[in-house]
Amino acid sequence: MRNPLNDFNSYKINSISRYFRSHDFLRSLAMTFLMLTTSCLLYITGHHHYILGNCIGILLTSFNDMPGKATNRSLAMVLSTLLSALIIIVINLLQFSLVFMLIFIACTTFALYMLSAFGNRAEIFAFVGALAISLGFVGDHQGKELLVYALTIFCGGIFYAIASWIYHLLTKNRQINEQLGELAKLTAGYLKQGIIAAKRSDAKEEVNQNLLGLQINIIEKQGNLGVLILSNRTITKPSSKRNRQMFLLKQLIDFMELAVATPLNLAKIKALPTTNEATLAPFINVAEQIYHQLFLITKELRSANVSHISKIQIDFDEVEETIQRFFKTVDLPQAREGVLVMHHLLDHYKLQIRHLMGIIAYINTPESIKELALSENQQGLFYQKESYHLRRLMPHVNINSPVFRQAVRMAFGFVLAYLLGALLDIEKAYWIMLTTLLILRLSYGITMQRALKRVVGTAIGAALALLLLQISTSIVFFVALAALGMLFSFSLLVRNYTLASLAITLCIIFSFALLDTHLHTIIAFRLIDTIIGALISIGVAYFVLPFWECQSFERNITNAAKANQSFLQEILFSHFSDKPSDTSYRLKRKSAYIASSVLNANLQRYTQDPKSKRGKYDLFYDLVALNHSIVSSITNLGNYLKGKQLTTLRPVLQEICSHLDHDFDAILETKNNLPGKEKAYSRLALYWQQLEDAHNAQYKLGNTAIDEVLKPAFKEAHIIKQEMQRIKELLQTMKTQAKGAF
């Protein structure tokens, strides 16, 4: 019998092992190593006064080391280092005047954060500029010494940019494989939630919450991988590693499309009045086998060297026997609905297996790939190039823009932090500014969450520092602790903010311990300044141009509805077109999933807003759940129609979809129903009745099985009738809910 404790220990060991092999840890290790080696060289050669500037330059530049085109990444690092050096020069020159300093801090911070309108890289660029404002108060440099100090900051940044270029050159394939493994793990987790929902009737809300959260992470991971694979150069050879990686990403995205519909299909079988646990068990068993197979692929992709994976061997005999037994036991006409639902899920599983086999084939025999995953034209469509045209900034120059509000709030928070430090004569007031910079976010909930984690992490770090001081006061010991703190603070920043705060506290305390012998005072002020900075951040987030998540819901619901409508239109266009476009289908699917993910994230942040601002939580939650169900139904329909040619139902399907288009348009607008709406559904119902009558007649003659002529007609009529009716009902419910919410 397996010991759960051993399984837990094994899981923990594997998690820790993966962390130490992860890109985050290795990049942080490279940065820490660069700081230590350059600092040691400067110390040995007698240039110890350059160490601080060198370390600050490396630190500031490291934040701009983010995925994207190599030239854009390198240019961002160089420009941010140059800008940081200039900001630090100005900060030191303005030390004589409190008024001029406050004006400079306010104007520069506001201008920097307005750059966030240009996207993620610009947002990080702004953060680094604001960080340079804070670090400009470290020490007092004047005259020639200031210019030398600024030059060492710039040189430290250039050292890091060169090291980063070499690091990415050597590790890019490893990074992509690691990310592919993480994506496979998240997708497997999504599939697992559908299995849990089928097994446990009491887990519906918990599963829905987990699915929404997983979808956010999966869509983000898919986007990051697309950037990693496509950013540097066009894929021109089928045999290249990048083409193979793109094939793997495509297979995982297609598998995710099927995974979105899996909980829905399992729920349909479970909801049948004539099913029981024995009927559902074989389907859950196959789903679990598929989940475990994907989990094995996850482990293989995350390993240092991708090797051979055994072929999939899943037996569908038990499922097929269950369908036959169900048909014989329940009998017509009650059995017909259940048999068709079960057959559809069986076909669904076979599609999932096909995608898994594709993944395994690309891993085991990469030389078998004879075509490009994406043509050169398609690659440009799936990788959105960075744009810094002024027209992207202009819509944000108004008080309703989230970018404008955050720019004002950051400027106000920075000015308040510096002014408070100056008035109270706090020696290291820039610690308050740093805390404000790291905590204050657009969302009040995220700001509060980060503030709590920051204070807790700092308090634990301060307590640990006091204990470590009892062990040794050796300079070597302090350097080692500062280096370890730096290493873990950056590698844990995304994974665990509390532990990252603990590590950065140790790094800062023991770095200053090399310059100041009053360690207990440093520790006390570190904790006090962190608490002050956290309180400033929370206060600014609540009172200064607050942005409550409810303000985004109407826009995000509208965007999600438009994306879903476009996705449904594309499914039908692809189906009815003589030359369907797989690229267009994928782009519309991507847009629908991204819009759904944005809406899900909106709801998650909304739950963290103050209670007084969460008066419509139930309505908003229902809208998000309805949107998720609509995406699942559209996906299910798209999976079925892909590659099939309808005959009899073609005009009926087109007419129904024109009505569904109108339903989408009406979600947030007052519109009357189109005339003849119910007639289209009546024709579909009539066609279904004709099929039932034909089968009933055969059954009376002793033909129990559906013959090969009726079977495809039954399948297509069933899935279209079921999903179209479901989408219609969901849209009508969403329209009603939206009226109440907005």
Image (spheres, rainbow, N blue to C red):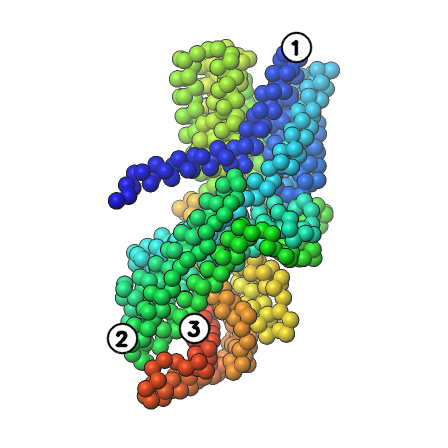
Pointers 2 and 1 in contact (C-beta within 8 Å):
no
Q: Secondary structure at mark 1?
A: loop
Q: At which x and y percent is residue 594? A: 54, 55
Q: Nearer the viewer, residue 170 or 556?
A: 170
Compared to residue 10, the image places residue 362 above or below, namely below
Q: Earlier in the sequence, mark 1 or mark 3?
A: 1
Amino acid on which the number 2 mark rests in the picture: Thr
Q: Nearer the viewer, residue 128 or 263?
A: 263
**Does residue 221 lie above or below 577 as drawn?**
above
Q: On the rendered structure, is 597 left or right of 124?
A: left
Q: How far apart, in angstroms, are the residues tagged by discs 2 and 1? A: 90 Å
* Residue indicated by mark 3: 722
Which residue is disc 1 drawn over? 46
Quarter of the rendering occupied by the N terminus: top left
Residue topped by disc 2: 329
Mark earlier in primary sequence (2, 1): 1
**Direction from residue 329 to residue 360 in the image, left or right:** right
- In 3D space, how far apart are the residues under numbered discs 1 and 3 (Cα atoms)? 78 Å
The image shows residue 711, relative to residue 221, as above or below, that is below
